[in-house]
Amino acid sequence: MKITAGAAVAMAVALPALPAAADTPDERPDVPVGTWLAARTQPAVQLTSFTYTGTVAVPTSTINQTAFNRLVEQATATVASGKISSDERSIAKWLFQQIAADVDTYLASTTPERTVEAEVGGLCTGWWVTPDGYMVTGAHCVQVGESELSQLFAQQALAKFNKQDAKEIISGLQGLEADEEIVKLAQQIYVTFNTNHMQLRNLKQSLSVVQSLPGGGVDKTAKPVPAELVSVGESYPGKDFALLKVNGQQNLPTVPLGDDSDVRTGDTLYISGFPGLVTNTPFFSLESKLEPALTEGPYNAKRTTQTGVPYIQTQAPSYHGNSGGPVFSKDGKVIGMLIAGTVSENGEASESESFVLPVGIIKEKLGEKNIKAAQTTTTTRYNEALNDFFRHYYSDSLPKFREVQALFPNHPYVAKYISDAQQAISAGKDESPKPILLWVLIGVGVLVAAVIVAVLAKVLRGRGRRRRHSEPSFVQPPPGAVSPPSWRQLPAGQAPPPAQEAYGQAAHGQAAHGQAAHGQAAYGQAAYGQAAYGQGADGYGPVVRNAGGYGAAPYGSAPDHASPQYGSAPEHANPQYGSAPDHGNPQYGSAPDHANPHYGRGPYGYPAPPHGQAQPPSGEQTRAVRYGQFTPPPNDRAS
């Protein structure tokens, strides 16, 4: 437990601060709301188009001469009354104004019939609501009424006929040079007449969504992809909703639906779409035209039409072409769809009044067709990659962007983000944090190191204690016996040995360890079992034969039964631990002429045997020796 606790403390101290928990995929980075919203929603917002094709047929026109003659008489009377000038230009203008006001009175249909193939249509905005190709847009973006359709064809197909007919009627004014005003008046006559008498034949309708081709990038490679009309409501001020289906789609990017309660008066709303002032102008490139524009403004009020349809009024700017575009809250969820705006007399949109169909109606209409908004890994990974990209985690964003590209090769923006991330990494701008696994590995490494150090410290302390326990210590001899030599203290009346004596050397007739001299028993020879405590009859005490202790086998005996392991009488000296002077052991010491130069001559201590060999007997008494443990022998001294 101590090791574990110490290692934990060490790891806590050694580990650097771990990075903060990863942000959730929908948590906005430190970028403006509009920037974040635009990047997330643009892939799902698409340019839509509806197209009508057919044959336009109009009759040739002729002047109703009787009615025209009566009009000339009226002109003469008007000049006479002074209501108009008498010059021919003023009279001609007055005549054309009267004819344009009532064309069917003064013009009649005749043959031949003239025909032309024509195509009309419009551009709007739609957005993917499911990954398999369901798209939401406005009802008026997929169909128009008969009167409006006739006006569109008249504007598109009749311009050439109108100019030709106006030129003929002006030529009837002999000797009069027509100015710009007279030309416009003449053309207006035939715009009205030809539109009223136009017929549409072989009418066909088609819907499409403009998508980029594989490889990414909304550019000149984009092409219209056919769409099927699944459901359509009533145009504004009704429930202006339509549902399209593009077949053969998968992994499309989508935008999530919110709730009506997500926003209220005062909140900022964000509109995404394709304003016609860009898509219809020749000054911008196709790539520019096919990138949605994002506008924002406050939620002004909730309105309700006379038929009970709710609408949101907002000051977020919108234009022709924005119709059908999604409207977002600051959290990136769809809270409605842009449907209409007020238009001035000259056709310009008013930025202060845009009207949004609430998302509750959109959900209602989707439910009628059992369609549920959903998203796939394409959207999830793309949003995560964008968050990394905006946090400058470029290395982290790259694999996610590449996964999106693999899931949806037609993605219009992912290729550009991949390129930008690679350039940022090359420029040294990457700030991606180290993976949490790296920090864990560092922590584990520190923990392992701390455990090893603690274990080693414990082992070393244990060895120190064992060394202390293994040092020789002498016990008190039995009563009546002479005290054993402690190398510091001798029995009373006995002179101390010379201080310069060393292991392995005999001096002045005193026996060295492992050697007998002057009848004195040496250690491991007659000691502890022969003479008391290794002493001969003329030494430190009386001889006691075969007494138990370090003198009996196997650790030594009397001289005639000496153990070959730990020493004996001189004639049977043990060559390992010492013997008589002439047979001294060169390892652990002998007589002076065979002294061991390795262990020195110090007066204290007992050198340990080589590693792996049995320990020589220490000063303690024992019968069964265990490493590091000793027990004193029983009192078996002879009386």
Image (cartoon, rainbow, N blue to C red):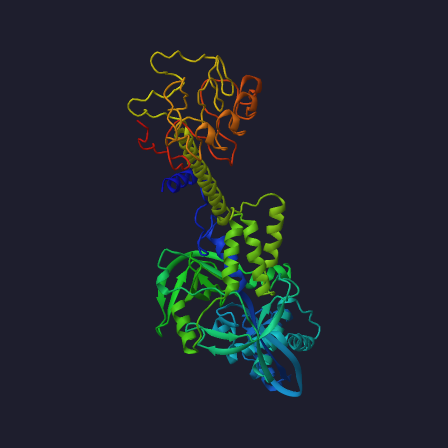
Q: Nearer the viewer, residue 473 or 67?
A: 473
Identify whether 283 is placed above or below 504.
Answer: below
Residue sitting farthest toward the left: 479
Q: Position of residue 596 (x, y in %)?
A: 55, 22
Apparent side of residue 616 relative to residue 289 in the rendered image (left or right): left
Identify whether 327 is placed above or below 526.
Answer: below
Identify whether 313 is placed above or below 582.
Answer: below
In this rendering, the count of numbered labels is 0
Asked whether the viewer can see residue 413, the reply is no
Q: Residue at x 54, y 72 (%)?
A: 81
Identify whether 385 is placed above or below 197.
Answer: above
Q: Quadrant of residue 315?
A: bottom left
Q: Residue at x 48, y 49 (%)?
A: 436
Q: Position of residue 473 (x, y in %)?
A: 37, 26
Q: Position of residue 342 (x, y in %)?
A: 45, 64
Q: Nearer the viewer, residue 113 or 34?
A: 34
Q: Residue at x 49, y 78 (%)?
A: 230
Residue sitting farthest toward the right: 175
Question: What quarter of the picture does the C terminus occupy?
Answer: top left
Q: Position of residue 132 (x, y in %)?
A: 52, 72
Apparent side of residue 142 relative to residue 363 in the rendered image (left or right): right
Q: Residue at x 34, y 73 (%)?
A: 308
Q: Nearer the viewer, residue 267 or 615?
A: 615
Question: What quarter of the picture does the N terminus occupy?
Answer: top left
Asked whether the viewer can see residue 332, the reply is yes
